[in-house]
Amino acid sequence: METLNRLPNKIVQCRCQFVFIVAMIIIFNFWPNIWLFNSKRPELKLKALSDTSCQGRCGAAVDSTKPCQCNSACTRFNDCCSDYNTVCASGGTCATLTSISAELWTNDVNRLSGSDITVNYQTQVPDGTTADRSTQKFFTYVNEAKLNAGTYKSLIALLNNYEPGKGIRESVTATETQEETAFLDAVLATKVMDSLLKFLTCKGLVTSQAALRSALKKHWFELYARSGTSTTLDTCGFEHIIVGEYKDSNSVNGFHNWVSFYEKEKSGSLNYFGYVSRANPSIIGAAFSWNSHVKTLGSFFIGVSPEFELAVYSLCFFTNPGKACNISLNGSPVTIMSYSKDGHLATAYLRARSGRRMPTTQASTSHGAQINITTLRPEMNAISV
């Protein structure tokens, strides 16, 4: 009798176990999907966003699987996505590289004017020069008040954060991380970065300012190994392009920023040899030494703001990595080359439009009257320039 009395309880227990097992099967089969849709995974957000937003879809052909459209005809058929007028402000197509680069230049309100900066080009030297042919400094005057504020101040704070030696592991302190954050905060608050964000959003390359910030953080500040055979995290895009580093015991690697050049020349660690080339708008190919390491040709803009340089190099890297990025700045044609390594920004620099040399022409700059220019040669070792 006792056994019979226990039987219903056993049946209930079995049923409960069965229900539990079924529930677990359902959870393990469907819970990942539930979790995904409640997560912040970018690929899911992008998919959902692409259905109801014009980000990355401006000018696209009609897609009947989408609830709204993003081409010029959508205004006639009243089926535009809600952000069509904002994202596709140019009438359904994204800006060209020529037009967006011109816009970046126009919006560079923090660029130093002629009264804020004076340079002394002195002697023109042949490519490959390793001897000093100029007796004076390149920068005669820079308005320090400009450099002690805004994005310039934030950039200068970063210049002493890196070990220039190749193969020496970089260590990032909490203070240095805060300085990187402050720099990104400062540049992302500018009109230049607003223009870049709008263009990259239209192209579908980013979806928000947060996404742009993440991309800038990764490609400019995330450490990686420069040598292909090394695992030592000894460099990053910012160090190579802006600060400069040593290629070996005798030569300089990277170093394509005028503020970095000015600060090092002011401190006495950099010696200007002369200019190899000059081009519009305010571009120089300079020969110099830094702590006895020689750069026979380092190209950089003169007087542009940190946000402009970060934006224009990022523009070319995000849209044309490993290829010639032909843009227009202040009405002058400019070509930028950029390369990646292990998913990071390895280098970005100014180069000639075609061949090793371009014809010598007459042009004017914001720093003087007519000058004789020879545009910059393309670098031979893309990852090392």
Image (cartoon, rainbow, N blue to C red):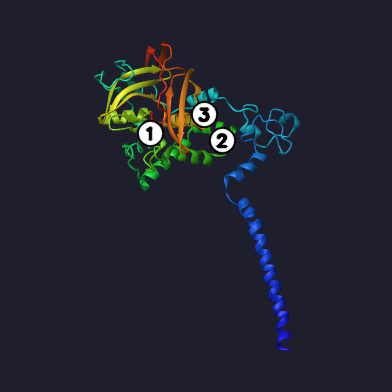
Q: CA distance from mark 2 to mark 3?
A: 12 Å
Which mark sits nearer the N-terminus, 2 or 3?
2
Residue on which disc 2 sits: 205
Question: From where the camera sits, is residue 114 visible?
Answer: no
Q: Position of residue 226 (x, y in %)?
A: 39, 37
Residue on which disc 3 sits: 320
- Which type of secondary structure does the marked residue at label 1 adopt? helix
Residue at 57% across / 45% down in the picture? 42
Residue at 46% across / 38% down in the picture? 342
Question: From where the camera sits, is residue 37 visible?
Answer: yes
Which mark sits nearer the N-terminus, 1 or 3?
1
- Which type of secondary structure does the marked residue at label 3 adopt? loop
Q: CA distance from mark 1 to mark 2?
A: 24 Å
Q: Nearer the viewer, residue 367 or 16?
A: 16
Q: Position of residue 325 (x, y in %)?
A: 50, 25
Q: Which label sits in the foreground, 2 or 3?
A: 3
Residue type at tag 3: Asn
Residue at 43% across / 14% down in the picture? 358
Please give left or right for residue 297 compared with residue 80 in the image: left
Residue type at tag 2: Leu
Q: Are marks 2 and 3 in contact (CB under 8 Å)?
A: no
Residue on which disc 1 sits: 240
The quarter of the picture where residue 17 lies is: bottom right
